[in-house]
Amino acid sequence: MRSAGITRPARIVSPHFSAANSRLSTDITDRAVASALPTRLRPADLLRLTDEGAEDVLAGRYDHLFPAGGLWPTENRWATRLIADDEVDVWLISWVPDSSTELHDHAGSLGALTVLSGALSEFRWNGRELRERTLTAGDQASFPLGWVHDVVRAPDLALGAKSELGPMDPTLSVHAYSPPLTAMSYYEVTGHGTLRRTRTVLTDEPEPGAVTSGILPNPGPATHTPEGDVK
């Protein structure tokens, strides 16, 4: 299937995906009180925005932002900004095997995602250890303030998929952040069972190390390295 001269991914999503039947993760809650948040948007609003963004991607409304020739990167993660305003940023991210985000938070932003195709493995710090879950096509998740996690493309064989990544077989997800990202901190788990912040990056992109094709330019990251464990 082609649109505007660009080949769209042949296997972009499960045929059962739709806004009506997306499976919400059991970890999703809407516990935050609106007045206490740094944004008027709630986690449920961000979930809706990523769901709508996923539908728009499937409908071809963002084909002009896809990689040239419809060939998805196979060595590095790729991201493009779909929506940007003062309240929210919405991104499309393409994932490749064995390339994780590292343990990170989203600073003062709430977040949410919807998986379009393939599957993602999330490793979330629960205060004592890392807990793993797999999000497959149609799954959603939201991230309150203080959420620390690492995300990576799930192994293809775990889903019974082809073991070799092809340029027409992307693992895709749509992410929303409100307020728009301004920084991300990165962490490591210490031998004492705590988190240690290793660095903080000032960035308006969810994938500072990825190949980016965005509507708005990134002014470039600046970093500092604070000391001390994070309780």
Image (cartoon, rainbow, N blue to C red):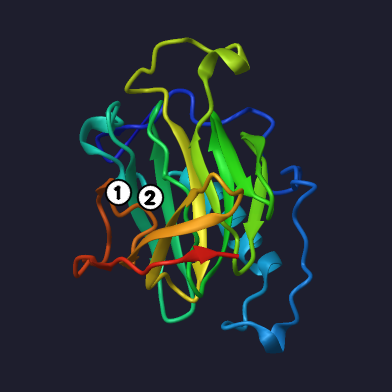
The residue positioned farthest toward the bottom in the image shown: 35
The numbered mark at residue 86 is none
The front one of 136 and 192 is 192
Q: How crowded is mark 1: few (under 14 residues within 10 Å), some or many (20 or more)?
A: some
Residue 199, compared with residue 40, is above or below; it is: above
Residue 52 location, quadrant: bottom right
- Distance (Cα) linking label 1 and label 2: 6 Å
Q: Could you say which is closer to the camera, residue 48 or residue 177?
A: 177
Q: Which of 132 and 40 is in front in this view?
A: 132
Which residue: 63% across, 82% down? Answer: 37
Q: Which residue is drawn at 57% across and 83% down?
A: 38
Q: What residue type is labelled 2?
A: Tyr
Q: In this view, does 84 lie above or below 12?
A: below
Identify the secondary structure beneath mark 2: loop
In this rendering, position of residue 129 left or right of residue 170: right
The amino acid marked with disc number 1 is: Leu
Q: Where is residue 81 in the image (x, y as percent from the top left)?
A: 35, 58
Residue 113 appears in the figure: yes
- Quarter residue 200 falls in: bottom left
* Mark 2 surroundings: few (<14), some (14-19) or many (≥20) residues within 10 A: some
Circle 1 residue:
65
Q: Do the residues labelled 1 and 2 touch (CB within 8 Å)?
A: yes
Q: Would residue 56 be seen by someone viewing this image from the given angle?
A: no
- Say which residue label 2 marks: 62
